[in-house]
Image (cartoon, rainbow, N blue to C red):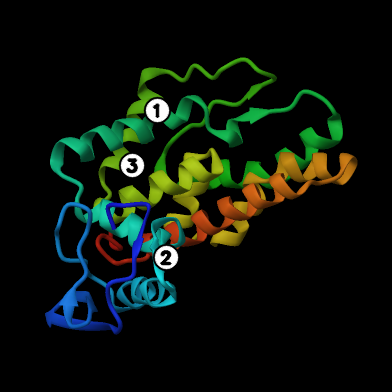
Amino acid sequence: MTALTIKRFYKAVTVAAPAPGEWRVLLDGRPALTPGRRPLGVPSQALAQAIAAEFDRQTERLTVAAMPIARLTGAALDLDAPAQERLIDQLAAFCDTDLLCHRAQQPAELALLQSTAWDPILAWARGRFGVVPVIVRGVIPAQPAPEVRRAYRSVVAALGPFRLVALKALASATGSLLLGLAVLVGRLDAEGAWHAAELDEQYQIERWGDDAEARARRLAIRAEIGAAAVVARSGDDLTTY
C-alpha cells in the first residue's frame, strides 16, 4: 500500500483474531501490512471487516485512493509519539480557522442558515468539552485567546491514535474541528457533518447551478468523511468521552 496503484497480489481476503482484542486482515492467509510494514491489526471486528471489504473490491490494480479506511487505519497504526504530538498541535490550531466560527455578513439569508445549522453544534461543544469558540464575521481571521487553544488541545490530546487520525481527516474534509468532534462522539453522523460542511456551497449551487467537477469534489469529501467516521468508531479509546 506504499504506491498509489499496484498490481493486485492476492486472491482471498479474510479476517482473523490472533489475540483477544485484535483483529487482522489477511491476504491469502498472510497479514496485510501498513506503509510502515506493521500488521494491519485493529481493535474492532467491524473495522477489520470494513478494511477487508476495501481490499476485496480491488480488481486487477490495487488503488490506495479507493481504500480510505485502510489508508487511515495504516496511518493510525504507524503513528509514533513525536508524530502524535505534531498531530495534536495541528488539530488544536483548527480553532483559528474552524468553518463553524466564520460567518457571512451578507446575504442575510445565508447568515441565518449558518446560525440555524451551526449554532447548536457550538453550544454542544461548549457544554460537552468546555471550549468557547470565537465567532467572526467576514474574512477577518479568528484570534482566540491562548486559553481557548489550550482547551482545544486538552480535548484532542485525550484521544488515542485511531481517533486522532480520524479526527484529522474529518477536520480537513469539513474545515471544522468541531464537526469532526461531533462525529467522533456520535453527536452527528457522517452525512450530517457533510451537509453542515457543504452549507455555503449548497447555497451557491441553488442560486447559480452546479458542475461536474465541483460535484465530484463534493462526493470525494463525502466519502472521506464516511471513511473517517468508520475509523473513529474503531474502539481504541471509546471511553474517553
Q: Position of residue 207 (x, y in %)?
A: 89, 41
Q: Disc 3 vs disc 1: which is toward the camera?
A: 1
- Marks 2 and 3 in Cβ contact (< 8 Å): no
For label 2, the residue is 230
Tell me residue 154's x, y (percent). 29, 37
First-in-chain label (2 vs 3):
3
Answer with mark 3 or mark 1, whichever residue precedes in sequence: 1
Which residue is pictured at 34% across the width and 55% down the height? 72
Picture residue at 85% right of the left edge, 36% below the top: 109
Q: CA distance from mark 2 to mark 1?
A: 24 Å
Which residue was labeled with disc 3?
A: 155
Q: Is residue 4 left or right of residue 216?
A: left
Residue wearing tag 1: 93
Residue found 57% across the figure and 53% down from its top: 220
Q: Disc 1 residue type? A: Ala
Give the Cα distance between marks 2 and 3.
20 Å
Residues at badges 2 and 1 in contact (C-beta under 8 Å)? no
Q: Is 21 rendered above or below residue 153?
A: below
* Nearer mark to the viewer, of 2 and 3: 2
The amino acid sitting under disc 3 is Val
Left or right relative to 195: residue 27? left
Q: Amino acid at mark 2?
A: Val
